[in-house]
């Protein structure tokens, strides 16, 4: 099944490695270093306009910045598949 990231962007759930809250990433040194490594090694696709990002989704081949909160994305990811 698929996970809707916002702005008509969807990815397969089985490709998702991590869903992180951007506020948490910015408040912790270890998370900041991790995010910087991801930025170095992955292509980043912004799903929405700059400044509106709330979460960061690490997938097999891309990193997505989404305007949807990490909690909402996690609920969607855990939801029953039709």
Image (cartoon, rainbow, N blue to C red):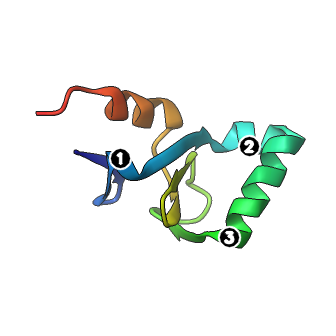
Q: In front: 43, or 49?
A: 43
Label 2: how many residues lie within 10 Å, few (<14), some (14-19) or many (20+)?
some
Q: Name the residue under label 3.
A: 41
* 38 sits left or right of 13 in the view: right
Q: Which of marks 2 and 3 is in front?
A: 3
Q: Which of marks 2 and 1 is nearer the N terminus?
A: 1
Q: Mark 1 points at which residue?
A: 14
Q: Quadrant of the C terminus?
A: top left
Residue located at (77% from left, 51% from top) = 34
* 50 sits left or right of 82 in the view: right
Give how far apart the Cα atoms at labels 2 and 3 are: 17 Å
Q: Quadrant of residue 78?
A: top left
Q: What element carries label 1?
A: helix
Give how far apart the Cα atoms at labels 2 and 1 are: 23 Å
Whole-percent x and y of residue 52?
Answer: 56, 54
Whole-percent x and y of residue 45?
Answer: 51, 69
Whole-percent x and y of residue 65?
Answer: 54, 57
Give how far apart the Cα atoms at labels 1 and 3 are: 20 Å
Residue 25, label in figure: 2
Q: Which of marks 1 and 3 is nearer the N terminus?
A: 1
Q: Quadrant of residue 63?
A: bottom right
């Amino acid at each position: 099944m698929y996970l809707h990231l916002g702005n008509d962007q969807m990815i397969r759930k089985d490709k998702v490695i991590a869903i992180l809250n951007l506020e948490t990433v910015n408040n912790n040194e270890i998370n900041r270093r991790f995010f910087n490594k991801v930025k170095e090694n992955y292509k980043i696709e912004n799903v929405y306009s700059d400044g509106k990002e709330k979460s960061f989704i690490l997938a097999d081949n891309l990193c997505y910045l989404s305007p949807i909160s990490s909690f909402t994305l996690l609920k969607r990811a855990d939801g029953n598949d039709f």
